[in-house]
Structures are given as structure tokens and as C-alpha cells.
Amino acid sequence: MPSEDNKRIAKNTMFLYFRMLFSMGVGLYASRIILTVLGVENYGIYNVVGGLVAMFSLLNGSLSTATQRFLTFELGTGNKDRLKKIFSTSLNVLFVISLLIIVLAETVGLWFLNVKMDIPEGRMNAANWVYQISLITFVLNVVSVPYNAAITAHENFKTYSQISIFEVALKLGVVLFLKISMSVDKLILYSFLLLGIAIVIRLIYGFYCTRHYEECKYSRKIDIPLLKEMFSFSAWSFIGSTGYLFKTQGINMILNMFFGVFVNAAQGIANQITNAVTAFVDSFTTAVNPQITKSYASKNYDEMTRLVFYSMRFSFFMMLILIVPVFTETEYILNLWLNQVPQYSVIFTQLVMLNTLINILANPMGIMTNATGKIAVYNCIIGGWSYMIVILSYLFFKFGNNIPQTALMISCIISVVSLFSRILLLKKILVSFSIKKFFLDVIVKVTIVSISTVISLIIFRTFIFSYIKLPLFHIFIAILVTILFIWFLGTKQQERVILSKKIVDKIYSKK
């Protein structure tokens, strides 16, 4: 029933928010220390070398999506025997993929690192150490995918949050230890310590899942028909996965080739802030996503559409509440957070966050498409737009453009084009999807709220902020204005009544 689903979503969101608040606080504090201890140069090296390793997740990412989708779908149908086959088949395939990743990384990847990348003189040895350690860490995460997918598919976000909080606490311990360590290459030591954490977390996930979920029992037997079905899904997901990685890590590689590791450090800072902000929204969407797939599996298409529209609108508003104040005082926030702010960090942060705000609307549509299983044309077109970001960025820089943020500007423009492509494609895939209702329920509301907020803040900046030069006051006004416009222009009357009742009940329950 929808009411029960809403309660489950609310409960799961609560667990994920607690995890997010802890992770965000520790993550931002840890980033400040890491940048100070490693220095801008080493921080840039770690960011770009780690990104190079992540490029090899092209093989893994598509199967991760398939595993998540198939497990969640079968939980919606209640087929336990098939659940066991999906888990074992995906784990066996991931073992094979891990070997392929190692082969590619130790040949093509190693050549690219040592020949094509712009690493400062005297730091190539450290970069190679970081590369090898990051590769081992990455492979460990690859074989953990079915276990993580099982916890998410079962909507056991309490345990997921607890393990994540423990992982973040370990990373904080690593950062503090790094701060007091002496007479070692701290970049290499940092990589080794993160590998140790990856091993511990991998063992915890494996132990928990094998004890609590009957499908998480490893078998070397591979179900060939199921393997073909999963690979068919994965093959088309592969295009979407490569597109996403080209859009993120591909830009990182191009920035390194044309501008060096110092610009990569700025990109790393921008990603840190954006990831912290996105964590708020991810806590909500992660709780909603399994319900979208299960609604499709049980043929409740109206409920699935309702969840998708609801998820798109509120995830956008949640992101807007956080992004607007950061946009208002980006430079102040960066200087308050960091001891040294790499060049381009301000403009990179603003552009990456703007791009994230656009893409936040697309995420639920991707979940909806994956639920149907009809992903071939969708992934080809959306993946193709992502490739264009890298191609156009490379051409701009190759032919004389020396403005690093150009790549991120291109990414924002392509993201808008890609969003409207998704809408048209989804209508072809799912006949019940109403473009008219989508525009009225989602696009119109988020556009009105966004434009109203921007115009109001321009007025405030012109007539008030120029006289009252208090950054915290500016941030407070930005948040207040955004919330008011969301409340009165972005929500429906029924939603305001329900939310008001919950707030009142919460207040009186504490008296």
C-alpha cells in the first residue's frame, strides 16, 4: 500500500540522513586536513590518479546496475530461488571482470599514467605507488557489489548506515594518523591506509549478508540463461556507465593533460563540496529507488509514476536549498573551510553544483527506465551526449582555449539537452508516462521556484547585501528565501497540509 511504502521511505530516509550528516561533517573536516598535510600538488596527484583507476570501472559499473535492478525486481515478485541464482551469477562474473580490470590497468592504464599524464617532476614514483594501491582497493570494491546491492534491495538502510558511519570513522582515524606521522611519503601512506579500510569493510559486508540473507550464499555454478539475460541488460547499461565516467573522470583526465595537477586539485575540492551537498539528496532518493522498481515489478504503474515525479521534484528542491547559499558565498565558504584554496576552486565549485542540480532531475528517470528493462536506445542516446562533453572539451582546449572551466560549462549545457532527451525517450519506453503531467508536476514547479529565488537574491544583493556585508546573514537570507518559494510555489496544497500536520505533531510530541 502507498501509505506503508511512504512510512518505509520516511524511516529509511531518516537512517540515511543520520549517516549523511555524520559522513558530510567528517568528510569536509578530513578534506581540509588532507589538503593541508598532502599539499595542493599531492592532493591533485591523488585526485587524478584515483580518477584514472576509476575509469576501469567501465566493465564493473554496468553489471553493478544490473545486479541492483535484478535483485530488487525479484524481491518485488517474491521469487527466492531466482534471487539466489542472481547473487551467485553476478559474483562469479565480477571475479572474471576483476581479472580483466587488472590486465587493462597494468597495461593500458600504466602506459597512460607514465607517458600521457602531467605528473610533477620527482613524483612519478609516488604516483605509481598510489596507482597500484588504488587498483587493489578498487578491485575489492568491485567484488563487494552484490553484497551492497543485497542490502539496498532489501531496504535495510539502518545496517547500511551503520556500516557507512563506521567506515567514515575509520577514514577520520586515518586522516588524524596521517597528520602526526613522520618521515614517510604521506601520499603513499594515505593510499595504504585506505586499502586497509577497504579490506575491513569488505569483510563486514560479506559476513553480514551471508548471515542475514539466504540468497547471499556463494555458489560456483553459473545459470547460463540468467547470465545471458543479465549480460544483455549490462551490455546496454555499459554505454550509460561509460558515458557517466567519461563525463566525470574523463574531464579530470583532460584537465590534467592541458593544465596539470593544480587544476585537478581545484576539481577535487569542487567535487568534495558537491558530494557533501548531494549526500542530502541521495539519502532521500536511495530510499525511494527500490520502491520504484518494486512498483513496476508488481505492475503498479501509477504508483511508480507518482514516486518518480515526487522523487524528482523534492530531490531538486532539497538540492536547491543547499546549493543557493553555497552559490551566494562560495569564496567565503571555501576560505572558511580550507587553509589554502587552490586556484579555480570557486568557479569549479559553482559549475559542478549547477550541473549536479540539472542532473538530479534525471536520476529517477534512469531508475524508472532500468525497472522496465528496456534500456538499449535510452542508454545509447544518453551515453552519446555524455561522450560529447569530453570530445568537445578536448577540441576546445586543443585549438587554443586556455580557460579550464570551459569543460564544466560544456557539461552543464549538454546536461540540459540530455534531460529533455530522457523525457522523450521515457515516453516511448513507457506508454503510461505522461509528458504533460511531468511538465506540470515537475518542470513548471522547479522552474518557477528557481527563477523566483534567483531574481529575489539579485534584488537582495543589489539593495541589501551591498550595505550589510555579513556572509552568514547572506547565507541565512538565501536559505530562507529558497524555502519560502519552495513552500508556496513548489508544493501542492495537499502536501503542505500533510507536512504541516507532521510538524505540529512532532512539536507536541516533545512537550
Image: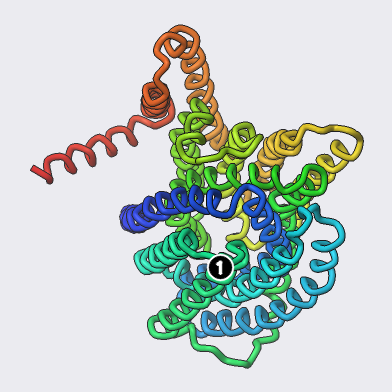
Q: Amino acid at mark 1?
A: Gln
Q: Nearer the viewer, residue 418 or 471?
A: 471
Quarter placement of the C terminus = top left
Q: Position of residue 313 (x, y in %)?
A: 48, 38
Quarter of the image for the N terminus: give it. bottom left
Above or below for 235 versus 369: below
Left or right of 491 in this view: 77 = right
Q: Quadrant of residue 473?
A: top left
User: Residue sitting at 84 percent across and 32 percent down?
Assistant: 401
Q: Is residue 226 visible?
A: no
172 or 124: which is nearer to us?
Answer: 124
Name the residue located 46 percent from the left edge and 48 percent from the top edge: 28
- In the orientation shown, which residue stands out farthest toward the left? 511
Vertical position of residue 251 compared to residue 224: above or below: above
Q: Which residue is mark 1?
A: 68
**Residue farthest toward the right in the current orientation of the protein:** 399
Q: Is residue 486 above or below residue 18?
A: above
The quarter holding residue 194 reads bottom right
Task: Indicate the position of residue 226 as horizontal and vertical percent values.
Answer: 65, 80
